[in-house]
Image: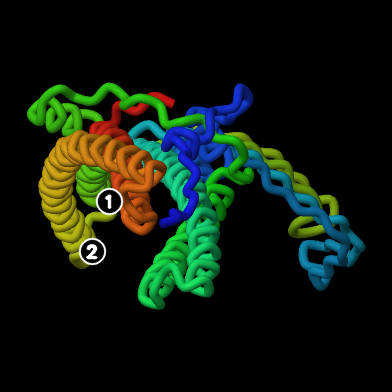
Amino acid sequence: MRRLFLPLVPLACFVASPSASAQDLDAAIADALAHAPALEAAKADEAAAKARLDRAKAESNPLLRVEGSVGTGRIDNGGFFGIKAANTTPLALQGTAEMPLYAGGRISSAIDQARGGAKIAGFQAEHARLQTIVQAISAYTEVLTARKLNARYAQLVKELTEVARQAGLRFKAGEITSSELAQARARKAEAEAGKAHAEGRLAAAQSAYERLTGKPAGDLAPLPGLPRTPPTLDEALDLARTSNPSLRQAKAAVDVAKAGVRAAKAEGMPQIGAFAEAAHVRDQFFPDYRADSFSVGVRGRWTLFAGGRVASQTRAACAEVDASEARLRQADQNLTGMVIDAWTGLATAQRMVDATRLQTEAATEALRGRKLEAQVGSVPVLPVLDAEREAIKAEAALLEAKGQRLVAAWQLNALTGIIEQ
């Protein structure tokens, strides 16, 4: 009985060898960091926060102000004191220099609030940077996985197309039954469905990669090895509580709230400042009026009764401190949960890689055996195709597991704040 010819193609042939000019993961991360709008916005917010800090510090510096006016008009005093009506050019110039001596804590608390705001903006920018890196790694991994699966399914469709064609010829010759022909066509349709799914996944992966990096996904180097991660869960938790930008942001928010309490209390304190003023006046009250003056001194202001304004503002600021501290505790709890999830996720992904590697090796060996058996005519082609399908599923599972393991490792490092890029 004649057998359908099925070419023996080694499994490794479906995995393209990396090109010498292939783009690596580090380059993809750099492109993503340079292109990410969220990171750019976070950096702009950080720059604005630093400018507000400089503005708060400037409140303790001397202030020099100049005011003036000049015009034209006519003064008529009705002959009072024998002054006749005349056209005038009224001119007034005044220069004032002020220096705060004591502000009751207003300036220092405002500086502390602005400094805390700058820290929060910096931590937000760092959080955006870490998330962009993880997203770039995920997109890079997905493109590689989708490309390999697409290539595998393309080869399977090619093989099954030939099998279905030969099955049709053998059915016409009366060598096989209609059920065998239907089985060959069903497997071909299944492979085409898998190919369509792989093509859609590849298109989505490459589109996501280009949106993230601003560049099309060209030749990509294979996935690198795992980054160094904390050796124990306790160490990962300690690193996260020390370096995680979201938790540090929550801590800075508590400091800002406490500075807000000091600012509210400062509203009930006196303000004292030194000043120097000089004035030059012409034609203001009667024609040819002249007056030049200069004075230096100290002036202050103290609101002795504010109708409860200061007290109510202080209570609101104290409530904000309580809320900020509660949010800090919540952030710490959330971070602990995420680190534990990331740690266990990495361990699970490692076990999945080990298991799927054994599954892939077994499926590959089974496929090789089936193809040898088909060559000598001991088994029909359909069992070979079933073995091919199982090998593809096993390889897909291995690719998925490796990608999940890499992303999990970087996600764990992002939570602990130890990514250097």
Q: Residue furthest front?
A: 1
Q: Residue at coordinates 48% horizontally, 66% vertically from top-left?
A: 167
Q: Secondary structure at mark 1?
A: loop
Look at mark 2 in the image and give the residue it sits on: 309
Q: Is residue 232 left or right of residue 178?
A: left
Q: Quadrant of the C terminus?
A: top left
* Tag 1 and tag 2, C-beta contact below 8 Å: yes
For badge 1, the amino acid type reads: Glu
In front here: 360 or 249? 360
In front here: 333 or 230? 230
Q: Residue at coordinates 37% horizontally, 47% vertically from top-left?
A: 377
Q: Residue at coordinates 45% horizontally, 55% vertically from top-left?
A: 2
Number of residues whose C-alpha sits closer than 10 Å to that of mark 2, classed few (under 14), some (14–19) or many (20 or more): few
Q: Is residue 391 left or right of residue 93?
A: left
Q: Quadrant of the N terminus?
A: bottom left
For badge 2, the amino acid type reads: Arg
Number of residues whose C-alpha sits closer than 10 Å to that of mark 1, classed few (under 14), some (14–19) or many (20 or more): many
In front here: 232 or 173? 173
Q: Residue at coordinates 16% horizontally, 37% vertically from top-left?
A: 351
Q: Position of residue 129 (x, y in %)?
A: 42, 38
Look at mark 1 in the image and give the residue it sits on: 267
Q: Which mark is residue 346?
A: none
Q: Quadrant of residue 78?
A: bottom right
Marks 1/2: CA–CA distance? 9 Å
